[in-house]
Amino acid sequence: MKKKVANKGYTLEIQSMEGRKENKTKQQYTVQTEKEALLLKKLSLELFSNSFDNEYGIGNILEHECDIAESRIVKYLVNNPEILELNKISFLPEDLENQVKIFFIEQDINENWIDYIEEYLDLEDNIDLIQDWITLIMDLNIKLLGEAKDYFSKITQNCDIFYSEKDLFVSYIN
Protein backbone atom coordinates (compact mmCIF):
# COMPACT_ATOMS: atom_id res chain seq x y z
CA MET A 1 0.00 0.00 0.00
CA LYS A 2 1.26 3.49 -0.88
CA LYS A 3 0.69 6.84 0.73
CA LYS A 4 1.03 10.19 -1.03
CA VAL A 5 3.40 12.45 0.91
CA ALA A 6 3.87 15.36 -1.51
CA ASN A 7 1.94 16.86 -4.40
CA LYS A 8 3.51 17.96 -7.66
CA GLY A 9 3.95 21.72 -7.59
CA TYR A 10 4.39 24.37 -4.93
CA THR A 11 2.87 23.43 -1.61
CA LEU A 12 2.14 26.06 1.00
CA GLU A 13 2.15 24.76 4.56
CA ILE A 14 0.36 27.20 6.82
CA GLN A 15 0.22 27.12 10.60
CA SER A 16 -2.69 29.08 12.00
CA MET A 17 -4.59 29.64 15.19
CA GLU A 18 -7.83 31.09 16.40
CA GLY A 19 -8.48 33.11 19.52
CA ARG A 20 -5.95 32.77 22.29
CA LYS A 21 -3.91 29.94 20.81
CA GLU A 22 -6.74 27.44 20.76
CA ASN A 23 -7.78 25.73 17.55
CA LYS A 24 -4.24 25.55 16.14
CA THR A 25 -4.04 23.89 12.74
CA LYS A 26 -1.62 23.12 9.96
CA GLN A 27 -2.99 23.13 6.41
CA GLN A 28 -1.38 22.42 3.05
CA TYR A 29 -2.45 23.84 -0.28
CA THR A 30 -0.70 23.11 -3.60
CA VAL A 31 -0.53 25.36 -6.66
CA GLN A 32 1.29 24.92 -9.95
CA THR A 33 3.35 28.12 -10.23
CA GLU A 34 5.90 29.79 -8.00
CA LYS A 35 4.28 33.18 -8.67
CA GLU A 36 0.93 31.98 -7.31
CA ALA A 37 2.60 30.36 -4.28
CA LEU A 38 4.44 33.59 -3.44
CA LEU A 39 1.27 35.69 -3.86
CA LEU A 40 -0.67 33.36 -1.58
CA LYS A 41 2.09 33.41 1.03
CA LYS A 42 2.08 37.23 0.99
CA LEU A 43 -1.72 37.26 1.22
CA SER A 44 -1.67 34.83 4.11
CA LEU A 45 0.99 36.68 6.09
CA GLU A 46 -0.46 40.14 5.51
CA LEU A 47 -4.24 39.87 5.18
CA PHE A 48 -4.77 36.82 7.39
CA SER A 49 -2.57 38.28 10.13
CA ASN A 50 -3.84 39.42 13.52
CA SER A 51 -6.26 42.32 13.17
CA PHE A 52 -4.17 44.29 15.68
CA ASP A 53 -0.84 43.81 13.86
CA ASN A 54 -1.35 45.88 10.69
CA GLU A 55 -3.86 47.90 8.71
CA TYR A 56 -4.98 44.90 6.65
CA GLY A 57 -5.16 42.04 9.17
CA ILE A 58 -8.51 40.26 9.40
CA GLY A 59 -7.43 37.50 11.79
CA ASN A 60 -9.48 37.25 14.98
CA ILE A 61 -12.02 39.88 13.91
CA LEU A 62 -15.31 38.75 15.42
CA GLU A 63 -18.01 37.43 13.07
CA HIS A 64 -20.35 40.36 13.79
CA GLU A 65 -17.62 42.80 12.68
CA CYS A 66 -17.54 41.49 9.13
CA ASP A 67 -17.91 45.01 7.69
CA ILE A 68 -14.48 45.87 9.16
CA ALA A 69 -12.96 42.73 7.67
CA GLU A 70 -14.56 43.33 4.26
CA SER A 71 -13.26 46.90 4.21
CA ARG A 72 -9.74 45.65 4.98
CA ILE A 73 -10.02 43.03 2.23
CA VAL A 74 -10.98 45.70 -0.31
CA LYS A 75 -8.13 48.00 0.72
CA TYR A 76 -5.67 45.10 0.59
CA LEU A 77 -6.78 44.12 -2.92
CA VAL A 78 -6.67 47.72 -4.15
CA ASN A 79 -3.00 47.79 -3.14
CA ASN A 80 -2.30 44.17 -4.19
CA PRO A 81 -4.42 43.52 -7.32
CA GLU A 82 -2.26 40.63 -8.58
CA ILE A 83 -4.38 38.06 -6.74
CA LEU A 84 -7.49 39.34 -8.57
CA GLU A 85 -5.75 39.23 -11.94
CA LEU A 86 -4.41 35.74 -11.27
CA ASN A 87 -7.94 34.52 -10.51
CA LYS A 88 -9.39 36.30 -13.55
CA ILE A 89 -11.70 38.61 -11.61
CA SER A 90 -13.02 41.12 -14.15
CA PHE A 91 -13.85 44.01 -11.80
CA LEU A 92 -10.42 45.40 -10.87
CA PRO A 93 -9.23 48.18 -8.53
CA GLU A 94 -9.00 50.70 -11.39
CA ASP A 95 -12.71 50.08 -12.09
CA LEU A 96 -13.54 50.79 -8.46
CA GLU A 97 -11.29 53.85 -8.51
CA ASN A 98 -13.14 55.27 -11.54
CA GLN A 99 -16.53 54.73 -9.92
CA VAL A 100 -15.48 56.28 -6.61
CA LYS A 101 -13.96 59.31 -8.36
CA ILE A 102 -17.08 59.82 -10.48
CA PHE A 103 -19.34 59.55 -7.44
CA PHE A 104 -17.28 62.10 -5.47
CA ILE A 105 -16.45 64.29 -8.50
CA GLU A 106 -17.40 67.52 -6.73
CA GLN A 107 -14.96 66.86 -3.91
CA ASP A 108 -11.90 66.47 -6.18
CA ILE A 109 -10.53 63.45 -4.31
CA ASN A 110 -7.98 62.25 -6.94
CA GLU A 111 -5.16 60.33 -5.26
CA ASN A 112 -7.05 60.12 -1.94
CA TRP A 113 -9.83 58.03 -3.51
CA ILE A 114 -8.95 55.00 -1.33
CA ASP A 115 -10.06 56.96 1.74
CA TYR A 116 -13.56 57.16 0.23
CA ILE A 117 -14.07 53.47 -0.57
CA GLU A 118 -15.96 52.61 2.63
CA GLU A 119 -18.24 55.62 2.30
CA TYR A 120 -18.91 54.81 -1.35
CA LEU A 121 -19.74 51.18 -0.65
CA ASP A 122 -21.99 52.17 2.29
CA LEU A 123 -23.78 55.12 0.67
CA GLU A 124 -24.70 53.45 -2.54
CA ASP A 125 -25.01 49.93 -1.15
CA ASN A 126 -22.43 48.99 -3.77
CA ILE A 127 -20.98 46.10 -1.80
CA ASP A 128 -22.24 43.86 -4.65
CA LEU A 129 -19.55 45.40 -6.89
CA ILE A 130 -16.80 43.80 -4.86
CA GLN A 131 -18.64 40.67 -3.72
CA ASP A 132 -16.47 38.55 -6.05
CA TRP A 133 -13.42 39.95 -4.22
CA ILE A 134 -14.77 38.98 -0.80
CA THR A 135 -15.83 35.51 -2.02
CA LEU A 136 -12.42 34.85 -3.59
CA ILE A 137 -10.53 35.89 -0.46
CA MET A 138 -12.75 33.91 1.91
CA ASP A 139 -12.52 30.81 -0.31
CA LEU A 140 -8.72 31.13 -0.23
CA ASN A 141 -8.86 31.78 3.51
CA ILE A 142 -10.61 28.48 4.16
CA LYS A 143 -8.31 26.57 1.78
CA LEU A 144 -5.18 28.04 3.35
CA LEU A 145 -6.11 28.29 7.05
CA GLY A 146 -9.21 26.19 7.55
CA GLU A 147 -12.52 27.41 8.85
CA ALA A 148 -12.63 29.63 11.92
CA LYS A 149 -15.14 28.77 14.66
CA ASP A 150 -15.84 32.14 16.27
CA TYR A 151 -13.97 34.64 14.12
CA PHE A 152 -14.07 35.98 10.57
CA SER A 153 -10.62 34.45 9.98
CA LYS A 154 -7.94 32.55 11.81
CA ILE A 155 -4.47 34.10 12.17
CA THR A 156 -1.54 32.92 10.05
CA GLN A 157 1.37 32.16 12.34
CA ASN A 158 3.76 30.79 9.74
CA CYS A 159 3.78 29.95 6.04
CA ASP A 160 6.39 27.84 4.24
CA ILE A 161 6.56 26.86 0.58
CA PHE A 162 7.88 23.50 -0.63
CA TYR A 163 8.41 22.40 -4.25
CA SER A 164 8.18 18.93 -5.73
CA GLU A 165 8.72 18.06 -9.40
CA LYS A 166 6.26 15.18 -9.12
CA ASP A 167 3.78 13.54 -6.78
CA LEU A 168 5.73 11.58 -4.18
CA PHE A 169 4.56 8.32 -2.65
CA VAL A 170 5.98 6.12 0.08
CA SER A 171 5.24 2.47 0.69
CA TYR A 172 4.00 1.10 3.97
CA ILE A 173 6.26 -1.55 5.43
CA ASN A 174 4.88 -3.90 8.06
Image: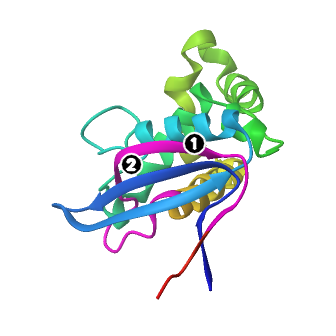
Q: How many numbered discs, if any?
A: 2
From what the image shows, is residue 6 above or below residue 82?
below
Cα distance between the residues tagged 1 and 2: 15 Å
The residue type indicated by label 1 comes to Leu
Task: Work out whether residue 143 or residue 135 is closer to the camera in this orientation and state it.
Answer: 143
Q: Residue visible at 51% across and 57% down? A: 144
Q: Position of residue 106 (x, y in %)?
A: 65, 16
Q: What is the secondary structure assignment of the residue under circle 2? A: loop
Q: Which residues are magenta?
A: 144-169
| Residue 108 visible somewhere in the drawing | no
Q: Nearer the viewer, residue 67 or 102?
A: 67
* Quadrant in the picture for the N terminus: bottom right
Which residue bears the numbered disc 2?
58
Residue at x 36% of width, y 32% of height: 55
Residue 44 is inside the magenta segment: no
Name which residue lies at 37% across and 41% down. 57
In the rendered structure, which disc, 1 or 2, sits on the residue that comes first in sequence? 1
In the rendered image, which residue does mark 1 sit on? 40
> Above or below — where is 114 with respect to 49?
above
Residue 164 location, x and y as percent? 65, 48
Residue 164 covered by magenta stretch = yes
Question: Compared to 160, does 81 lie above or below?
Answer: above
Residue 158 placement: quadrant = top left
Q: Nearer the viewer, residue 47 or 13?
A: 13
Q: Quadrant of residue 51?
A: top left
Dot 2 crowding, Cα within 10 Å, few <14, some 14–19, many 20+: many
Q: Hey, which quadrant is residue 74 in on the image?
A: top right
In percent of width and height, residue 100 lies at 67, 29
> Residue 145: in sight, yes or no?
yes
